[in-house]
Image (cartoon, grey):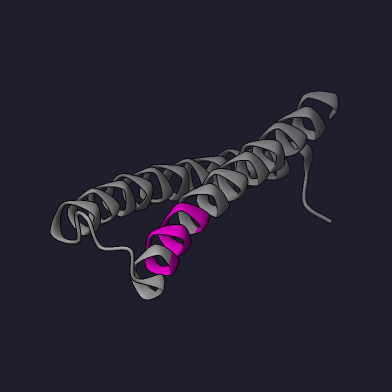
Amino acid sequence: MAGVDDVRDGIARAKVKAEEALTAIQQAGLALDEAQSMLVEATQGSGQDEILQSRNMLVDATQNLQLVQGTVRNSISSAEGYAGRL
Protein backbone atom coordinates (compact mmCIF):
# COMPACT_ATOMS: atom_id res chain seq x y z
CA MET A 1 0.00 0.00 0.00
CA ALA A 2 1.16 3.53 -0.76
CA GLY A 3 2.36 5.77 2.01
CA VAL A 4 0.24 8.62 3.37
CA ASP A 5 2.19 11.24 1.41
CA ASP A 6 1.80 9.24 -1.78
CA VAL A 7 -1.96 8.98 -1.23
CA ARG A 8 -2.26 12.70 -0.54
CA ASP A 9 -0.18 13.48 -3.63
CA GLY A 10 -2.35 11.22 -5.76
CA ILE A 11 -5.51 12.85 -4.46
CA ALA A 12 -4.06 16.31 -5.16
CA ARG A 13 -3.26 15.29 -8.75
CA ALA A 14 -6.73 13.83 -9.18
CA LYS A 15 -8.20 17.09 -7.89
CA VAL A 16 -6.28 19.07 -10.49
CA LYS A 17 -7.63 16.83 -13.27
CA ALA A 18 -11.16 17.01 -11.89
CA GLU A 19 -10.93 20.80 -11.79
CA GLU A 20 -9.78 20.75 -15.42
CA ALA A 21 -12.85 18.67 -16.20
CA LEU A 22 -15.06 21.20 -14.39
CA THR A 23 -13.63 23.96 -16.58
CA ALA A 24 -14.33 21.91 -19.70
CA ILE A 25 -17.88 21.19 -18.54
CA GLN A 26 -18.41 24.89 -17.90
CA GLN A 27 -17.18 25.68 -21.41
CA ALA A 28 -19.51 23.04 -22.83
CA GLY A 29 -22.41 24.62 -20.96
CA LEU A 30 -21.58 28.04 -22.39
CA ALA A 31 -21.41 26.57 -25.89
CA LEU A 32 -24.80 24.90 -25.40
CA ASP A 33 -26.28 28.19 -24.19
CA GLU A 34 -24.91 29.88 -27.28
CA ALA A 35 -26.26 27.13 -29.53
CA GLN A 36 -29.67 27.46 -27.93
CA SER A 37 -29.67 31.23 -28.46
CA MET A 38 -28.68 30.77 -32.09
CA LEU A 39 -31.42 28.20 -32.60
CA VAL A 40 -34.02 30.45 -31.01
CA GLU A 41 -32.92 33.37 -33.17
CA ALA A 42 -32.85 31.32 -36.36
CA THR A 43 -36.27 29.77 -35.76
CA GLN A 44 -38.07 32.77 -34.26
CA GLY A 45 -41.80 32.30 -34.66
CA SER A 46 -41.56 28.66 -35.62
CA GLY A 47 -44.00 26.52 -33.73
CA GLN A 48 -42.79 23.29 -35.29
CA ASP A 49 -42.58 20.41 -32.86
CA GLU A 50 -39.11 19.50 -34.12
CA ILE A 51 -37.75 22.93 -33.23
CA LEU A 52 -39.42 22.98 -29.82
CA GLN A 53 -38.05 19.51 -29.15
CA SER A 54 -34.58 20.59 -30.24
CA ARG A 55 -34.66 23.61 -27.91
CA ASN A 56 -35.83 21.44 -25.02
CA MET A 57 -33.04 18.94 -25.64
CA LEU A 58 -30.45 21.72 -25.46
CA VAL A 59 -31.96 22.90 -22.19
CA ASP A 60 -31.89 19.32 -20.87
CA ALA A 61 -28.27 18.91 -21.92
CA THR A 62 -27.31 22.10 -20.09
CA GLN A 63 -29.11 20.95 -16.95
CA ASN A 64 -27.40 17.56 -17.15
CA LEU A 65 -24.03 19.29 -17.32
CA GLN A 66 -24.91 21.18 -14.15
CA LEU A 67 -25.69 17.87 -12.45
CA VAL A 68 -22.35 16.47 -13.61
CA GLN A 69 -20.54 19.53 -12.24
CA GLY A 70 -22.17 18.96 -8.86
CA THR A 71 -21.16 15.32 -8.87
CA VAL A 72 -17.54 16.17 -9.72
CA ARG A 73 -17.44 18.82 -6.98
CA ASN A 74 -18.81 16.31 -4.47
CA SER A 75 -16.17 13.81 -5.54
CA ILE A 76 -13.42 16.36 -5.01
CA SER A 77 -14.82 17.23 -1.59
CA SER A 78 -15.00 13.59 -0.53
CA ALA A 79 -11.45 12.88 -1.66
CA GLU A 80 -10.14 15.98 0.10
CA GLY A 81 -11.96 14.95 3.27
CA TYR A 82 -10.30 11.55 3.12
CA ALA A 83 -6.89 13.11 2.53
CA GLY A 84 -7.43 15.44 5.47
CA ARG A 85 -8.07 12.53 7.80
CA LEU A 86 -4.88 10.71 6.85
Q: Residue at x 32, y 54 (%)?
A: 32
Magenta segment includes 36: no
Relative to 52, does residue 83 appear above or below in the rendering? Answer: above
Does 27 sit left or right of 80 as displayed?
Answer: left
Res 78 quadrant in image: top right
* Span of residues in magenta: 53-60
Does 75 sit left or right of 56 as displayed?
Answer: right
Quadrant where the C terminus sits is top right
Q: Residue at x 24, y 53 (%)?
A: 40
Does 32 sit left or right of 21 as displayed?
Answer: left
The image position of residue 62, as x and y in percent, is: 46, 51
Which secondary structure type mostly characterizes the magenta part of the structure?
Answer: helix
Q: Residue at x 77, y 52 (%)?
A: 2
The image position of residue 9, as x and y in percent, is: 61, 40
The image position of residue 25, as x and y in percent, is: 42, 50
Q: Give the camera-side residue of 84 and 76.
A: 76
Q: Give the camera-side residue of 37 and 75.
A: 37
Relative to 1, does residue 23 appear above or below in the rendering? Answer: above
Residue farthest top in this picture:
84
Q: How many marks?
A: 0
Quadrant where the N terminus sits is bottom right
The image position of residue 19, as x and y in percent, is: 47, 40
Residue farthest left in this picture:
42
Relative to 16, does residue 25 appear above or below in the rendering? Answer: below
